[in-house]
Image (spheres, grey):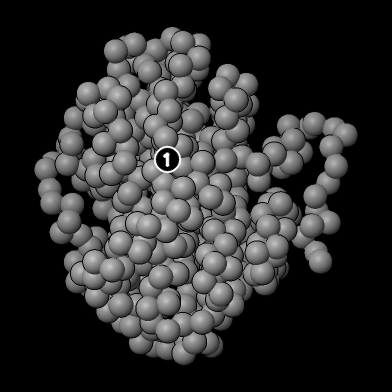
Amino acid sequence: MTLQSTAPVQEATHFDRFSIPDKNGRFGPYGGSYVPETLCHPLRELTNAYEEAKQDPDFRNTLNSMLKSFAGRPTELYYAERLSKKLGGAKIYLKREDLLHTGAHKINNALGQALLAKRMGKQRIIAETGAGQHGIATASVCARFGFDCVIYMGAEDMRRQALNVFKMKLSGAEVRGVEAGSKTLKEAINEAMRDWVTNVRDSHYILGSALGAHPYPGMVRDFHRIIGEETKRQFHEKEGKLPDEMIACVGGGSNAIGFFFDFLEDLKVRLVGVEAGGKSLSEGEHAARFEGGKLGILQGCKTWILQNPDGQINQTHSVSAGLDYAAIGPEHAFYKDRGRIDYANASDDKALEAFKMLSSEEGILPALETSHGLAYAFERASELSQEQILCVNLSGRGDKDAMEAARVMGVEGLPSMSSMVHE
């Protein structure tokens, strides 16, 4: 079976990836800054601090040092030999972001923004989290720098990600559950933004994905560019050439845009982002924004959103908490329009199959978010020749998902971790 894929709008053309976003934070018609007046000043302050930091060798040297000593970079580019032979097609490589401290790529951005907060003299950090990986990354860097830390998380995601809730609390963070709406990531972002409006003087909001108001989409992308930079260098060392296709899961899209960015001008490398196909592509049963979404504004930026004809945000669903979100990062919408990045979606069932297959064939437990990208890659590999190469960004590890996956798969007799949600 071929997974659902959206066709590119037009042939990919050569362009300057460093020309976007523009000075107003726009990626063509997408992006921008649509926020209450109260947030205009802290966003300008953040923009100025980031622009200055980019020109400061001390900032870059400090960040690079901490990415190595605290986060564990560089991460390995791993050839999944047994899996490749089993599928019988293209060679499959995995970029092992799951090996980072706190278990996912999120630590790259959390460290960068923590250093910016320190530069701006902020002592309190606000964050949101869905799967919990951004939450535990933020809690960890706050412990490292001595910041006060408040993390907002939907009540449903707290149930699904009880282990990460416990880890955040162990790191000294206050985790505030959100009971509104679908009790997932969208509502957590709403509450984090309300907190920021109230506490702009002493607080910095570490947004966890490549979305939201300017400067967040471009800034978060830049903090994750190291993923693609390392991948390109490692392929030259291991294979003497670039991969034929690169694949990453896409929620807001931070891991994917960081993975893809250094390859955007290498037009022979196909780039594929995989969204959450959920239970089906019926309204309310998925989180595939390019399947049924439309242009709109949500939580600070203009992008593709799952919404009804009246502009009300649709309910979303994914077995993975981190992909369960109604909007996609504006830079992804920009490259989709230009045919440079293709987008597909994988269902809950396919993601769970990939979750089990990578674990059993390679001994690597992937996050359920990552498993969506793996599901597409496994089916795609069998369509290609053995001389071709696929690379999947293994954006996070699956310890956090083990209990939820067991519940969904009907495994009995396992202890519950739900008691860890409450102190």
**Residue in the picture at 33% in, 33% down:** 246
Q: Is residue 410 left or right of residue 352?
A: right
The image shows residue 34 at horizontal and vertical percentages of 36, 76
> Residue at position x 42%, y 76% from top?
117
* Percent x, y of residue 381: 40, 19
Q: Secondary structure at mark 1?
A: loop
Residue that appears at 39% across and 88% down: 37
Question: Left or right of 159: which side holds 153?
Answer: left
Q: Position of residue 13 (x, y in %)?
A: 13, 41
Q: Work out which quarter of the rendered image holds the C terminus and state it.
A: bottom right
Residue 33 is situated, as x and y percent measured from the top left of the image, at 33, 74
Name the residue located 70 percent from the left edge and 65 percent from the top edge: 169
The residue beneath circle 1 is 75
Q: Is residue 179 above or below residue 184?
A: below
Q: Is residue 39 above or below residue 261?
A: below
Q: Is 134 or 264 nearer to us in this picture?
A: 134
Dot 1 crowding, Cα within 10 Å, few <14, some 14–19, many 20+ = some
- Look at label 1 and name its amino acid: Thr
Residue 405 visible from this viewpoint: yes
Residue 194 seen: no
From this view, report whether residue 164 is shown above or below residue 319. below
